[in-house]
Amino acid sequence: MGLVQRRAKQLESAISICLVSILVLIALAVFIRQSDYDMGRFGIETAVGEPITAKLRSLAPAGFETLSEIEVYHAENLFEKINGKAPLYIESGFEKLFTQRFISKDRESLWMELFIFDMAALRNAFSVYSVQRRADVEILPDMQFGYRTSDAPYFVHGKYYVEFIASSKSDELLKAMIAAAQKIQTNLAVDKAAQIPELSLFPQEDLVAGSFKLYLASAFAFQGLTDTFTARYNFGDQTITAFLSRRPDPQDAQLVAKSYHNFLIENGGVAKPAINKTLEGKVVDFYDTTEIVSATGPFVAGIHEAENQEAAEKLAVKLVNKLSEAAIAPPPRVPVVFVIIGVIIIIVIVAAIIAWAKRKKLSYRQSND
């Protein structure tokens, strides 16, 4: 009986050691994953660096100094600073607005006001930037999303949307604002790994640079189209707008596409035959423009208010093909560390079963002796 007990104790000790080792490995795996955790995938960016208020004072360009104290606005009082536009920001995830004025040391008539909107996430910042972007602007190539007008730059920096107001149209003032913008990019820490993956799903051929827009709600006046991206394409002397919206699953995409199609018909649209039969039942004549809407995997996609049906269908087919590739993309690979942990757990379970069987066998033999 003593021999059986000793062997059982040894087996139990071995199993305990294995279990403790598994717990250590799991803790290590969790630590590794957390250290490289990308909240940007959920539309949330991690807070990094010093508080923004400590950075604002250092953003004065050469030859300028601060003119006023830093002002901070929240959702409750944002209308006091940007009356009329506050709802757009608040509905897009706005958290805070920081403003700071800078004035020329040599010419008091030259001053600028900096607006830094904390929108909580890159997608939100891009949305307010894109839907307010003006026509005929110059894209700023050294910024992820940015442009300049004749008197000021506008851009996205991580979760921040940034713009300036100038006291007057001046080359000197514009140069100073560009310098301040560059300082923001250098000094204001953000999650540089955050991306907007939907932008890569649009076909690149004939795409108008910097034409992306994101409507977080009610795209094209239809409440069902949320998180909708648009992009413009040049076809000869015509411009065509393509759109896509990622839905939770293919069933929801089919439902939203059908609802939007019905919305068009109910508001004066007329279903029309498709030139490309793969788009049959998806083309609508809407007051002498062509609308196309379809569902591909988890995506709702199509063309909005195109003047030329043939060109619209060609672009729609390209977009659908691109989304089809994304919809059937292979699932993400399981990290190796989790595979190893899984194998070890299986080995321990098998070892525990064998140990239990041996123990029962020894107990049976001992009872028969």
Image: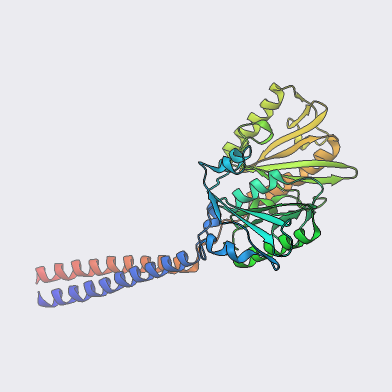
**Residue drawn at point x = 71 percent, y = 27 percent:** 264
Q: Residue at x 18, y 74 (%)?
A: 9
Q: Report the coloring of the rendering.
A: rainbow
Q: Residue at x 66, y 54 (%)?
A: 113
Residue placed most toward the observer, 68 or 352 = 68
**Residue 158 sits in which quadrant?**
bottom right
Residue sitting at x 82%, y 48%: 136
132 to 283, vertically: above or below: below
Does residue 260 appear left or right of residue 24 in this picture? right
**Residue 9 in sight from this viewpoint:** yes
Image quarter in which the C terminus is found: bottom left
**Count of marks placed on residues:** 0
Q: 264 left or right of 82? A: right
Q: Position of residue 270 (x, y in %)?
A: 76, 23
Is residue 347 left or right of 108 when viewed as pictured?
A: left
Q: Quadrant of the N terminus?
A: bottom left
Q: Relative to residue 120, is residue 240 depicted above or below?
A: above
Along the viewing direction, whichever of 55 and 327 lies nearer the viewer: 55
Find residue 307 and report its horizontal and vertical position in percent.
84, 34
Would you say residue 339 is visible in this rendering? no
Q: Position of residue 190 (x, y in %)?
A: 57, 62
Query: In the displayed structure, would residue 300 be above or below residue 189?
Result: above
Give residue 5's position: percent from left, percent from top: 14, 74
Please give left or right for residue 279 compared with residue 100 in the image.
right
